[in-house]
Amino acid sequence: LADERPDLSSSLRSLAADVGVSERTLRNVFREYFGSPPSRFFLLRRLHKARQRLRLGDPHRITVSGVAAELGFWDVGRFAAKYRSLFNECPSGTLRSSMRRAD
């Protein structure tokens, strides 16, 4: 469902309704199975997707802000801070390294 409907990541209620369980059950299952609440799971998922797009993207055609917006990060500064915290690299550094790989 997360791949088919990225909007679900922002709405626990929608996700719970789509899978036919209560929000509480969904939270408990996420904590048990993934070790984190749904919000953290979806944040990490979106950050990993951003990294993949930045690593594989053409730096002449994509931008960090474009990738961030495409994945629902509306504050690019916050996106960059979360990205750097997770990957120990700024998103623009990842994008620049994709240019070096292409050369």
Image (cartoon, rainbow, N blue to C red):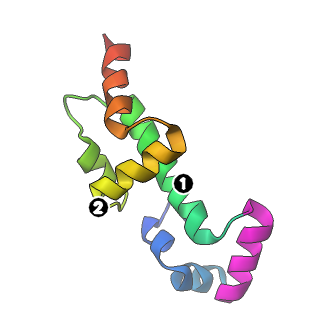
Q: Is residue 61 left or right of residue 32?
A: left
Tell me the number on the disc at residue 45: 1
Q: Give the mark toward the camera: 2 or 1.
A: 2
Residue occupying image coordinates x 73% and y 61%:
34
Say what secondary structure mark 1 lies in: helix
User: Would residue 49 be seen by someone viewing this image from the given angle?
Assistant: no
Q: Check if residue 32 falls in the magenta segment.
A: yes
Coordinates of residue 58 in the picture (x, y in percent): 28, 28
Residue type pointed to by label 1: Arg
Q: Residues within 10 Å of mark 1 (few under 14, many from 20)?
A: some
Coordinates of residue 70 in the picture (x, y in percent): 31, 55
Q: Residue furthest top?
A: 103
Tell me which segment is drawn in magenta.
Answer: 21-35
- Disc 2 from disc 1: Cα separation: 17 Å
Does 53 sit above or below residue 17? above
Q: Quadrant of residue 7?
A: bottom left
Residue occupying image coordinates x 19% and y 28%:
60
Instruction: In this rendered view, identify the residue nearer to me: 76 or 8.
Output: 76
Instruction: Please give the residue where the numbered disc 2 appears in the rendered image.
Output: 75
Q: Main secondary structure of the magenta part?
A: helix
Image quarter (top left, top right, bottom left or bottom right) of the N terminus: bottom right
